[in-house]
Amino acid sequence: MNFKKIEEGFVSLFLPANCKICNKPLNPRNRSLICEECWNKVEWLEPPYCSICSKPLPAYETSPKNSFPICRKCEKNSFHFKKVFALTLYEGIMKRIIHIFKYEKKMSVIKGIKKIMEIYFSRNHLPFSHLHMIVPIPLYRRKLKERGFNQAELLARIISKYFNIKLNKNNLKRIKSTQSQTKLSANERIKNVKGVFKVKNGKEFWEKNILLVDDIYTTGATVEEAAKILKRAKAKEIYVFVLARANF
Ligand SMILES: [Zn+2]
Ligand SMILES: [Zn+2]
């Protein structure tokens, strides 16, 4: 990943600090808390991957002629969303970056994330022109208060600005708190998120093409549950964008 551009345009008002990952001194113009070298180690999601859920696929399972390979899970199941767009792999450095962003609440990291998202958007022709709105996966009230921000909403804002598509952040609600999904199996995750979302005003999603946004996609249980609720509110087509895709 070429991160050269990331440092451009940053004017530092602060004293030089060290990279939150490798601890080397940061270029004073870099305000993303993470050095260029570390950003360059982030792995983009590269083909071959499933054309529906973006799961990375081993090269031997796909024929080079097949531009729409499908993973085994997507062969067997159908989802309420049409397709997942994933920017990076949820591995190595990206795991640490997301951890610093979410759990250490280092908001400056979003500056670097914004840059890599913009690089991704400029390189890929994403079929977003027919979208009516962008909907971030909501946090439960208490969690939002604890963390102070919804990471999915910050990502959704970046997409909304870049493509000039309306952000709709108040109509999909999380009405139950859920336990952390990290230690749960695929089936437990499905149960864990069942009934956690609610649509406030059904009319807002009626016949709309919607991009759901979240930070990480692991089994897809959360976005699938949200997509199901949006479909129930008669949304037309649902797509998903995630910052990082776990190879699960
Ligand atoms: Zn570093
Ligand atoms: Zn798949």
Image (cartoon, grey):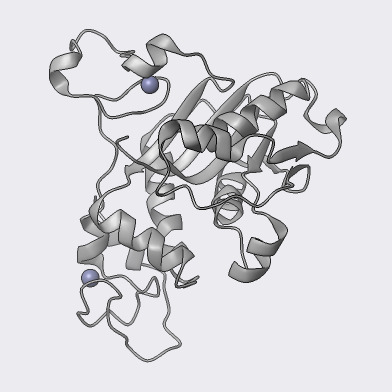
Q: Residue furthest left?
A: 60
Quarter of the figure with the C terminus: top left
**Horizontal side of residue 9 vs 78, given as left or right:** left
Q: How many marks?
A: 0
Q: Who's the residue at 78% across and 42% down the image?
A: 171
Where does residue 92 sit, x and y in percent of width and height? Answer: 23, 54
Is residue 226 depicted above or below 130 in this figure?
Answer: below
User: In the figure, is residue 95 to the left or right of 194?
Assistant: left
> In this picture, is 113 found above or below 147?
above
Residue 236, percent across and down?
70, 18
Q: Is residue 229 left or right of residue 151?
A: right
Q: Nearer the viewer, residue 163 or 37?
A: 37
Residue 228, percent across and down?
65, 25
In which of the image's four quarters is ligand 1 placed? Answer: bottom left
The residue positioned farthest toward the bottom in the image shown = 15
Residue 122 makes an appearance in the image: no
Q: Residue at x 24, y 50 (%)?
A: 1
Of 223 and 64, nearer the camera is: 223
Q: Quadrant of residue 41?
A: bottom left
Whether residue 95 is situated above or below residue 19 in the rendered picture:
above
Q: Quadrant of residue 166?
A: top right
Q: Which residue is pictured at 29% across the width and 13% down the height?
A: 67
Residue 183 in percent (x, y) is at 40, 48
Q: Above or below — where is 191 with respect to 214? A: above
Q: Is residue 143 visible?
A: yes
